[in-house]
C-alpha cells in the first residue's frame, strides 16, 4: 500500500463490529477507564487510558504504518518519548555516542538530567564521518543516537553505514526523524532500531499539538517501551491523538509543498549577496547532497543560512519580516523563522555552540506551504533594509 493510502486509512478502518456506526474517522474516546463484563478480562481490550486508549491506539497503528515498521507509541511530547526510550534501554554507567549537532533540548536532557543526575555517559561526535562513531564506541556503549538532517545545521549522517558499525559493536541505533518526516526518510528500512519523532512538527503539521512518538519493528524492544510508557505515564491525550491522526492524512501533500517552497527559497538565498552561506540538503552545493539523494526521497522544508555580519544584522533582518513568524518550532503549514543562538539552541553553552558551528549569524527557516512568491517578497524586503 502506498504511503498516502496508509496515511489516510490505517488505524481508521470503518468499524462495523465494535461500534457499528461505520465512522470513517476514529472517534475521540475520552473515557479514562473501561468497564468490563467479566472480572478476569478487559472486555474490549482496554482497562485504563494511560495503559491503552482506542484513539491513541489508532494513531499508534498509523505511525507504525507510515514509517514502514511494526509498532508505534504516542507520547505527550518528543522529549517525553526520548525520556521513555532512555529509561527503557539504559542504566547508570551505560554509554551513548550521539551526533554533536542535536536539537538543543535533546542535549539538555542528556547532559543536565541523564548524565549529571543518573550517571549515564554521553560522547558527542561529528557523525558525518562514520569513522568518528567507530572511534567513540566503548565496551559499555548501548546506543548510537542520530538526528539526520540535524537541527539547525542540516547535516546528514549515513544511517545504514552507522547501523552496520553499531550492530557489530552490539549497540542499538536511534534516529530522530523529525526533520525529514517519514514521507522523505524511513530509517528502520535503512537499519535503525528505533525512530523518534516530535509529532509536534511535520507529522501533526498545524502547530496546534505537542506530541512525540517511538517507532520500531523489534517486538522485544517494543514491549519494553510500552511497559515504560505506561509505568512513567507520558502518554498522548485522546484529543491530541485525534489531531495528530488528522494531520497525518495530509502529510504527503504538505511535504511535497514544503519541499517545493524550500528549494525556491534556498535558491533565492544562495544568490543573494547579503547571505554568506545556505544549508539545505537539496542544493547541489550541500556537501552531503549525494547522501541526501541516496538516503532520502526528498529534501524536506527546513533550511538555515548565515547572514553577512553577525548577531546585529541577524536581529535587524528578523525584525523586518512581516509574513514569517519569529518563533521556535517547525513543520507547521505556516512559515517560521528563528535565531538558534538566542532561541532554540540557547541552552547549549556558547563555546560548545561555536565548536559545532552554530554561529550568532545563523538563521533557521521552517518553510511553510504558503505562496512562495509572497514568502520570497517578504525575505527580500527584509534583506534590503539591512
Ligand atoms: N527532536 C527534534 C529534532 C526537535 O526539533 C524537537 C523540538 O523542537 C524535539 C525533538 C523535541 O520535541 P518536543 O518539543 O515535541 O518535546
Image (tube, rainbow, N blue to C red):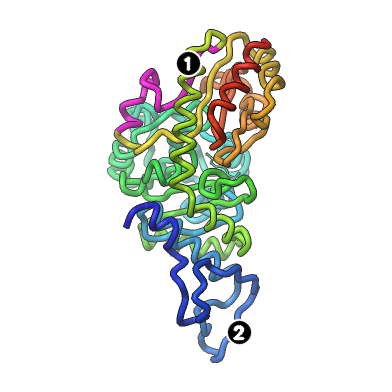
Any part of residue 202 in sight: yes
Q: Is residue 8 above or below residue 114?
A: below
Earlier in the chain: of badge 2 and badge 1, it is 2
**Image check: 338 left or right of 94?**
right
Q: Residue beneath label 2, please?
A: 35
Which segment did they paint magenta? 275-293
Q: Is residue 156 magenta?
A: no
How far apart are the two marked residues, 2 and 1, measured between alpha carbons? 61 Å
Residue sitting nearer the eye, 41 or 278: 278
Rendered-image quadrant of the N terminus: bottom left
Q: Is residue 277 magenta?
A: yes
**Image check: 151 left or right of 168?**
right
Q: What is the x, y in percent for residue 220?
A: 38, 62
Any part of residue 352 in sight: no
Name the residue at 58% across, 10% down: 308
Q: Specify few, some or many for label 2: CA neighbours under 10 Å numbering under 14, 14-19, or 20 or more.
A: few
Name the residue at 53% across, 8% down: 273
Quarter of image, res 139: top left
Q: Is residue 364 above or below residue 75?
A: above
On residue 386, the disc is none
Q: What is the x, y in percent for residue 290?
A: 31, 27
Q: What is the x, y in percent for residue 167?
A: 30, 45
Q: What is the x, y in percent for residue 255?
A: 46, 41
Rendered-image quadrant of the C terminus: top right
Pointer 1 residue Cβ closer than 8 Å to ligand 1 = no
Q: Specify few, some or many for label 1: CA neighbours under 10 Å numbering under 14, 14-19, or 20 or more.
A: some
Q: Residue beneath label 1, please?
A: 270
Find ligand 1 in the image and state its quadrant. Answer: top right
Q: Is residue 200 above or below residue 65?
A: above
Q: Secondary structure at mark 2?
A: loop
Amino acid at each position: 500500500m502506498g504511503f498516502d493510502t496508509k496515511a489516510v486509512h490505517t488505524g481508521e478502518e470503518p468499524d462495523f463490529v465494535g461500534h457499528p456506526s461505520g465512522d470513517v474517522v476514529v472517534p475521540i474516546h475520552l473515557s479514562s477507564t473501561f468497564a468490563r463484563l467479566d472480572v478476569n478480562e478487559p472486555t474490549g481490550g482496554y482497562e485504563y487510558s494511560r495503559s491503552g486508549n482506542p484513539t491513541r491506539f489508532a494513531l499508534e497503528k498509523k505511525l507504525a504504518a507510515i514509517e514502514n515498521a511494526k509498532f508505534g507509541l504516542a507520547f505527550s511530547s518528543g522529549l517525553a518519548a526520548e525520556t521513555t526510550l532512555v529509561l527503557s534501554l539504559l542504566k547508570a554507567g551505560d554509554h551513548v555516542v550521539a551526533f554533536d549537532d542535536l536539537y538543543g533540548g535533546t542535549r539538555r536532557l542528556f547532559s543536565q538530567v541523564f548524565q549529571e543526575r543518573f550517571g549515564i555517559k554521553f560522547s558527542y561526535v561529528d557523525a558525518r564521518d562514520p569513522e568518528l562513531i567507530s572511534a567513540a564506541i566503548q565496551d559499555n556503549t548501548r546506543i548510537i543516537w542520530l538526528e539526520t538532517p540535524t537541527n539547525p545545521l542540516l547535516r546528514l549522517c549515513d544511517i545504514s553505514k552507522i547501523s552496520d558499525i553499531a550492530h557489530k559493536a552490539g549497540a542499538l541505533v536511534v534516529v530522530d526523524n523529525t526533520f525529514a518526516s517519514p514521507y522523505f526518510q524511513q530509517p528502520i528500512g535503512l537499519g535503525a532500531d528505533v525512530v523518534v519523532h516530535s509529532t509536534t512538527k511535520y507529522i501533526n503539521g498545524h502547530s496546534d499539538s505537542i506530541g512525540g512518538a517511538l517507532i520500531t519493528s523489534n517486538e522485544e524492544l517494543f514491549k519494553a517501551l510500552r511497559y515504560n510508557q505506561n509505568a512513567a505515564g507520558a502518554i498522548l491525550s485522546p484529543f491530541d491523538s485525534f489531531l495528530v491522526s488528522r494531520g497525518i492524512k495530509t502529510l504527503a501533500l504538505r511535504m511535497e509543498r514544503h519541499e517545493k517552497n524550500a528549494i525556491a527559497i534556498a535558491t533565492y538565498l544562495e544568490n543573494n549577496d547579503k547571505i554568506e552561506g545556505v544549508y539545505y540538503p537539496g542544493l547541489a552545493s550541500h556537501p552531503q547532497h549525494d547522501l541526501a539523494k541516496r538516503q532520502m526521497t526528498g529534501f524536506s522544508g527546513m533550511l538555515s543560512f548565515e547572514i553577512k555580519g553577525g548577531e546585529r544584522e541577524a536581529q535587524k533582518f528578523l525584525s523586518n519580516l512581516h509574513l514569517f513568524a519569529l518563533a521556535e518550532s517547525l513543520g507547521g503549514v505556516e512559515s517560521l523563522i528563528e535565531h538558534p543562538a538566542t532561541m532554540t539552541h540557547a541552552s547549549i553553552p556558547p563555546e560548545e555552540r561555536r565548536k559545532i558551528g552554530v554561529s550568532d549569524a545563523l538563521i533557521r527557516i521552517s518553510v511553510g506551504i504558503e505562496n512562495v512568491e509572497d514568502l520570497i517578497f517578504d525575505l527580500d524586503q527584509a534583506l534590503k533594509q539591512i
